[in-house]
Amino acid sequence: MKKIIYLFLIFFVTGYTNAQQFVYKPINPAFGGETFNYQWLQSSASAQNQFDNSSSSRGLSSLNSLNNFTDNLNRQLLNEISRKLMGDQFGDGDLKPGTYVFGSMYLEVIQTGQGLLINILNTSTGEQSEILIPGS
């Protein structure tokens, strides 16, 4: 008798149970989730990050110092070379209107009503720049 009651209860309960459809909704905005979740995901990832980028070892800092020194030395050498080239080309006075060529760089200096206009053309790449020095 107990078996029949249990079977009846099992069939009765399962007959009236309702199921619903399983719907997946992504959280990450990169995969179609809500865009407002981005800040939360970013702060959560930053909080869980075990690596600290601010502290560097001695080997890396000395390497960075060496790289900085090399870059600084290269800038100073290029500055000195360009200053000598400009001095040879223009003399010690002011820029004079005309055209000047430095390797693949073509400079055109024009006196306008607004000031001194310098057009720079790199003939190897085709890049152009324009500099206006007002009131010269």
Image (tube, grey):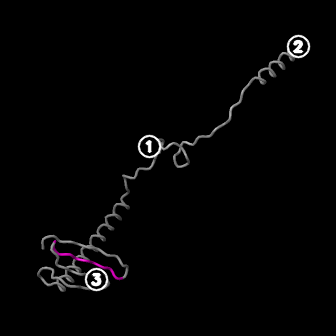
Pair 3/2: label in front: 3
Visible residue check, residue 77? no
User: Where does residue 119 sit, x and y in percent of width and height?
Assistant: 25, 77
Visible residue check, residue 127? yes
The disc, 3 or 2, on the residue closer to the chain's N-terminal end is 2
Magenta-colored stretch includes residue 122: yes
Q: Main secondary structure of the magenta part?
A: strand
Relative side of 11 to 131, left or right: right
Secondary structure beneath dot 3 equals: strand
Single out the residue that lies furthest toward the right: 1
The disc, 1 or 2, on the residue closer to the chain's N-terminal end is 2
For mark 1, what is the residue? 39
Q: Quadrant of residue 83?
A: bottom left
Q: Report the magenta residues as a range.
A: 114-123
Single out the residue that lies furthest toward the front: 113
Relative to 59, residue 130 above or below: below
For mark 3, what is the residue? 106
Relative side of 90 to 78, left or right: left
**Mark 3 surroundings: few (<14), some (14-19) or many (≥20) residues within 10 A:** some
Q: Quadrant of the C terminus?
A: bottom left
**Residue type at tag 3:** Tyr
Relative to 19, residue 126 above or below: below
Pair 1/3: label in front: 3
For mark 2, what is the residue? 1
**Residue type at tag 2:** Met
Residue at position x 45%, y 45% from top?
42
